[in-house]
Image: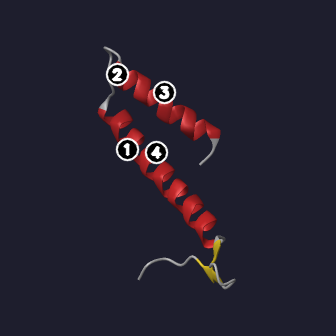
Amino acid sequence: MDMRDIERINELYRKSKSSVGLTPAEKSEQAKLRREYIAAMRANLRGSLETIKIQNPDGTVIDVKRAP
C-alpha cells in the first residue's frame, strides 16, 4: 500500500459524498482498496506488537504473544 493508493481511497470517498456518487466499478475498487489498506494496517500493527516485551516488577521479561 503506497501513498497513491491512499490518495485514491480518499478521492473515491470524496466523490462518494458528492452529488455525482460512485459508479459500480468505482464502488468495487473502493472496497478492494479499503480491504488492502486494512490488511496492511493489521500486518503493521501485528509486527509492532511482536517486538514488544513486558518487564514484570520482579525483573522477568516476557514477550507479547498472540492470544490462542
Q: Which residue is mark 2?
A: 17
**Residue mark closest to the camera, 2 vs 1:** 2
- Tell which circle, 2 or 4, labels the residue nearer the N-terminal end: 2
Q: Residues within 10 Å of mark 3 (few under 14, many from 20)?
A: few
**Residue mark closest to the camera, 2 vs 4:** 2
Q: Compute the Cα span from label 3 to label 4.
A: 12 Å
- Residues at circles 3 and 4 in contact by the CB criterion of under 8 Å: no
**Which one is in front, 25 or 20?**
20
- From the top left corner, tell me how far across and down residue 14 is, in percent: 42, 23
Tell me the amino acid under the disc marked 2: Lys
Tell me the amino acid under the disc marked 3: Glu
What residue do we see at 66% from left, 71% from top?
51
- From the top left corner, tell me how far across and down residue 37 is, in percent: 50, 49
- From the top left corner, tell me how far across and down residue 25 is, in percent: 35, 36
What residue do we see at 50% from left, 59% from top?
42
Q: Which residue is mark 4?
A: 33
Q: Compute the Cα span from label 4 to label 1.
A: 6 Å
Residue extending farthest to the top is: 19
Q: Secondary structure at mark 2?
A: helix
Q: Residues within 10 Å of mark 2 (few under 14, many from 20)?
A: few
Q: Which mark is residue 11?
A: 3
Q: Please tell me whether residue 28 is drawn above or below residue 62 in the rendered image.
A: above
